[in-house]
Amino acid sequence: MADKRFFDYKGPFRLRELAEISGTTLHPSADAEKQVKDLSPLDRAGVDEIGFLDNPKYIVSFERSRAGACVARERHAAKAPHGMNLLITENPYLAFAKITNHFYPVDYASFKGDIAQTAVIDGTAKIGKNVWIEAFATIGANAEIGDNCHIGAGTVIGRGVKIGNDCFISNNSSLNFCLVGNSAIIHNGARIGQDGFGFAQEKGHNVKVPQVGRVIIGDNVEIGANTCIDRGSGPDTVIGDGTKIDNQVQIGHNVHIGKHCIIVAQVGISGSTQLGDHVMVGGQAGMTGHLKIGAQARIAAGSGVGFDVAPGESVGGYPAIPIKEWHRLSFSLKKIAEEMGAKLKKEKNE
Amino acid sequence: MADKRFFDYKGPFRLRELAEISGTTLHPSADAEKQVKDLSPLDRAGVDEIGFLDNPKYIVSFERSRAGACVARERHAAKAPHGMNLLITENPYLAFAKITNHFYPVDYASFKGDIAQTAVIDGTAKIGKNVWIEAFATIGANAEIGDNCHIGAGTVIGRGVKIGNDCFISNNSSLNFCLVGNSAIIHNGARIGQDGFGFAQEKGHNVKVPQVGRVIIGDNVEIGANTCIDRGSGPDTVIGDGTKIDNQVQIGHNVHIGKHCIIVAQVGISGSTQLGDHVMVGGQAGMTGHLKIGAQARIAAGSGVGFDVAPGESVGGYPAIPIKEWHRLSFSLKKIAEEMGAKLKKEKNE
Amino acid sequence: MADKRFFDYKGPFRLRELAEISGTTLHPSADAEKQVKDLSPLDRAGVDEIGFLDNPKYIVSFERSRAGACVARERHAAKAPHGMNLLITENPYLAFAKITNHFYPVDYASFKGDIAQTAVIDGTAKIGKNVWIEAFATIGANAEIGDNCHIGAGTVIGRGVKIGNDCFISNNSSLNFCLVGNSAIIHNGARIGQDGFGFAQEKGHNVKVPQVGRVIIGDNVEIGANTCIDRGSGPDTVIGDGTKIDNQVQIGHNVHIGKHCIIVAQVGISGSTQLGDHVMVGGQAGMTGHLKIGAQARIAAGSGVGFDVAPGESVGGYPAIPIKEWHRLSFSLKKIAEEMGAKLKKEKNE
């Protein structure tokens, strides 16, 4: 049961209703009228609860689970324990997300607040309808905030910044020199629009290169806590529609990220690098500047990418190489070291 | 001498007293009544000052030091310069920490403040005794703050958050959807309890998975500046008692960290990974999701861990392998490259 | 054209004037009286606009550009398209920086503000002339702020902190236990002066080591968004004059960074490591503690440095080795893996 201090419970629900809202199919043996009281991980679930099996790593938990109901793939149905009622789908994670949202709805565009008396809003700023601005937020000159937005406590919206409708900007974040689309979610401590890191050399000193571009953020973008996105040096830094960025990601000036990408935590993307649509980047991966990463490319966690990546290609390693090669290399290095160690020893003795 | 603008000096002390409070033994040749005025690194210390030798890398500084007193191990005593008074212990770092605290006591649970008039505290929040809340802090509905806590300027404590006794929460940090034990130290800009990074795929779009868990933080935990800890997706994210986390660490949803662990700066731990007790993780190391890292395991700085690690095992490298193998591999790779380069060249010429 | 919501346009200018302020030479075929209306990347520039060619990777854009003017090196002049007016210099990036600043001047020391009524300034703090302090900033007891400084919204300046003249401290940042020189630029969310990460072990518990040093920041230093610099444990943490630090960099206690260094985003430098002057560190590189990195050394992006680096040396890789060796190793590993794979297969069959 989710903690009621934080989440609003809407259950229980009949299995029939959960199948409907999640787009899943009731297994022939399932009881459509079964009442489900709550969500639970499979290893802790009881007979009134529903879990899900997506990652095959958890198949043993599934086989041993006491959950009364479970979302799973057709091919795992035969392994379900006796008495478990199955909702069948090829995308259990998606279905369970919908079920979770049904039990504990979170609507970032909804709000219960008002404009705090302690917020400082410049007289020239335009504020839309139904906007919630929390304590100690500041809205600069000529900034524009769309309808149904939520601006968190202590957040700074700089002069001229434009934010679309239905955006959730959380606490203690800083937005400057940027234009944000609709339905953005920007988490605590995100830093958007500060100077890109550009210095020219003059007689052994670092001379600051003025950064006169912006950050342009599309619709339905999510940006994680303490993530930094620098504004362009002249061209803009661009984040495409539907792209989701995790915590502590660093995006340099003039970077152009396509639509519907996934960028996991602590990734660093150097200046002027371009990512196509639907690119996936694993945690802590890094890219040098001025690269082209094709659409649908996948970059493994921890990789260091120094060359362009073709559309659809998967790469890994440091320096990054095609992912299959990297797996083979990783596997063989231990053997190579042993063999070469033995060889060197033998040579020494001869 | 520590800067008096920032620290309160309580010295001088007799060597006898310093031995007592630090749990060290006076070397037979030491003068128990010698007065020590201050702390200093060995290479800068004078005759009235005390230093310490823990890392053997600094043995030359020790041999050449003019320090009047020094905390050191028995086995280094013979190398002490003439006139240096030794306090002997097998744990010089710990002893020097105690001596430092004696000269310049810092008590995070103590405070000199009050509840700032500019703080915004919801009428339903419960605030303990002797609590210091600084300017522009906000405390949400139904939040609970224990006795003797210090909440820094601009910090946001979300609705329902519960904080134990004797906690020090520094400036500009954000705590949501979390329960914190006693005697926690949470540094500037830490982000605790925001949404985990979970998206399901639907027709090429990233669909947000609701995150309905919490962050549960034990007693005596320290969390570094700008570190992020996401709340669980349904299960909780858990940080065990006595665990110390450095700056800019990223901890994903559902991660479970045991007791008395050390997690150095810029580490990233992906979702649902579990660490046992007393695990040590070096800086910038990364772990993929759903791993089990056994108790007492050690992960070298910069490693990328993709597989489970057994209790007590040490691993390093990217991808991480047992540490001894990794050191041998690192050492031999240069030779391998040379030899193979020569071989390839020869083949080419034949 | 830079967005007028954010930048003030001062153009147009004659080419003659741009040559003069940028220290470049008009190419013999160029029209000194040509009017330039704006800046633009070469691939988008029109006949009234000026671009630059520095990175040879963009030579094709240069050859195909419709830009009316361009800053370039002498050796590329022959490849300029017909009608392009050239400003010649061996440092196009620097010259273009100066031209950008001429079109859209940004002066961090200038300001248009005042001391916000909502700022909380301790009665014992000393504030210089012409200081702009934004909403919800807090200035602690005995802090000193020099002339012409700008302190951003929600920023916390702790007790005793001293800041020189002409400093720009942006929003939501935290400065404690530190002394800052003149003309510093500190970006949003930077955390300076919190406790270093030092723990001694006692009976399986982590005992906090008091951190009684400071952070000393020289003149003309720039510090990126969400970067963390811990204060010293006793000695100070020092950042030399003219050093530029990008976003999300982590600098441990007692680190000593020389003058005019460049530290790119997400770098981590462990405690007590020393960098000489003019060191360049690529993004996401890490250094273990207690190292000496010589002046003019260069550390490649993503490297993990575990040993001292000699002055002027370039290193790369994890673990880091001389850069040429690392490039050769990276190149040969694929071949090694293939060959060894074939060999192992053959042995298996015999």
Image (tube, coloured by chain):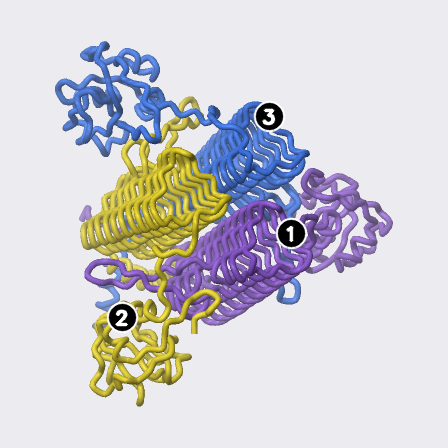
Chain colours: A blue, B yellow, C purple
Identify residue for label 1: C132
- Please tell me if label 2 and label 1 are on a single chain: no
Residue at point 55%, 27% (across, down): A131
**Whole-percent x and y of residue B35?**
33, 82
Residue A336 in the figure: left or right of residue C176:
left
**Which residue, as the protein is rendered here, is positioned at the far right?**
C33
Residue at point 39%, 30% (across, down): B199
Q: Is residue B342 visible?
A: no
Label 2, label 1: how far apart the Cα atoms are:
46 Å
Between A67 and B46, the one lying in front of the other is B46
Q: Is residue A113 placed above or below C142 in the rendered structure?
A: above
For disc 2, the chain is B
**Whole-percent x and y of residue A177?**
62, 40
- Please tell me if label 2 and label 3 are on a single chain: no
**Whole-percent x and y of residue C60?**
65, 44
Closest to the camera, between mark 2 and mark 1, is: 1
Identify residue for label 2: B95
For disc 1, the chain is C
Mark 2–mark 1 contact, CB under 8 Å? Answer: no
Q: Residue A309 bears which disc, if any?
A: none
Q: Quadrant of residue A145?
A: top right
Q: Please, what secondary structure does the residue beneath circle 1 have? A: strand
Q: Please, what secondary structure does the residue beneath circle 2 have? A: helix
Closest to the camera, between mark 3 and mark 1, is: 1
Other residues around mark 2 within 10 Å, as few (<14) / some (14–19) / many (≥20):
many
Task: Please name the amino acid that badge 2 sits on.
Answer: Ala
Identify residue for label 3: A128
Q: Is residue A15 placed above or below B342 in the rendered structure?
A: above
Label 3, label 1: how far apart the Cα atoms are:
29 Å
Task: Please name the amino acid that badge 3 sits on.
Answer: Gly
- Please tell me if label 3 and label 1 are on a single chain: no
Other residues around mark 3 within 10 Å, as few (<14) / some (14–19) / many (≥20):
some
